[in-house]
């Protein structure tokens, strides 16, 4: 059931972020990429980790991850380690470009946990988009450009309503309210009303 899967994902994100965040606000801000597409990359992170030099690593990661049947943290960790070994690089030199490609920045839970929570389709899609964008000066996806154009033309609705597990909230422009609601529900282990 979709609602159960959403609740499980929210709980997994809350648990993964619990030790990394000092406040709920920080947890919510650092968790946005789990609940929405990455449309922008942190400038410093992209400049350092998403370069022409890391493109072969990202391609190798994509190939290795495509071959994984059981999308679980231990197997994902092994896949990242295999790429690091094959590229004669340290795990960090492989994990950081991957982290930036899938999260938009350099902060996330352990990379294997992050990949598991995001899911196969999201990870492979984000890697594909990142490879297409590597080397471009503009670090935004076509979706963000479309959203910006819709916003400029007035063809959008700033007061979207999203449902969480038993929770309806007004969503601000960057969906922070949805993430807040989802993470608080997961931490409390009960829906907000």
Image (cartoon, grey):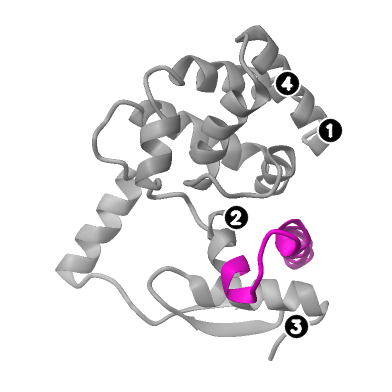
Residue corresponding to mark 2:
34
Which of label 4 and label 2 is nearer to you? 4
Give me the disc on residue 178.
Answer: none
Q: Quadrant of residue 93?
A: top right
Residue at 60 percent across and 22 percent down: it is 61
On the rendered image, what quadrant is the C terminus found in? bottom right
Q: Nearer the viewer, mark 3 or mark 1?
A: 1
Judging depth in this view, the residue of 155 and 143 nearest the camera is 143
- Which secondary structure is most common in the magenta stretch? helix
Count residues near mark 4 (Cα–Cα under 10 Å), then give few for <14, some for 14-19, many for 20+. some
Tell me if 132 is positioned left or right of 177 in this view.
left
The residue range painted magenta reads 1-27
Badge 4 element? helix
Mark 4 or mark 2: name the one nearer the start of the chain. 2
Q: Secondary structure at mark 2?
A: helix
Residue 30 percent across, percent down from the top left:
57, 60
**In the picture shown, does residue 48 fall above or below 9?**
above
First of labels 4, 3 by sequence position: 4
Nearer-N-terminus badge (3/1): 1
- Indicate which disc residue 191 carries: 3
Whether residue 182 is in magenta: the answer is no
**Label 2–label 3 contact, CB within 8 A:** no
């Amino acid at each position: 059931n979709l609602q159960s899967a959403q609740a499980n994902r929210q709980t997994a994100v809350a648990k993964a972020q619990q030790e990394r965040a000092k406040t709920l606000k920080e947890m919510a801000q650092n968790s946005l990429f789990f609940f929405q597409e990455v449309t922008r990359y942190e400038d410093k992170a992209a400049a350092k980790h998403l370069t022409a030099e890391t493109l072969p690593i990202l391609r190798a990661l994509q190939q290795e991850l495509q071959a994984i049947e059981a999308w679980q943290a231990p197997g994902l960790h092994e896949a990242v380690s295999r790429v690091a070994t094959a590229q004669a690089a340290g795990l960090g030199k492989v994990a950081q470009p991957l982290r930036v490609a899938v999260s938009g920045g350099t902060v996330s839970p352990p990379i294997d946990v992050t990949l598991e929570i995001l899911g196969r389709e999201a990870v492979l899609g984000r890697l594909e988009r990142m490879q297409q964008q590597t080397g471009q000066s503009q670090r935004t996806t076509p979706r963000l450009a479309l959203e910006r154009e819709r916003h400029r033309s007035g063809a959008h609705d700033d007061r979207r309503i999203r449902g969480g597990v038993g929770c309806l909230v007004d969503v601000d422009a960057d969906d922070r309210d949805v993430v807040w609601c989802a993470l608080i529900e997961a931490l409390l282990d009960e829906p907000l009303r």
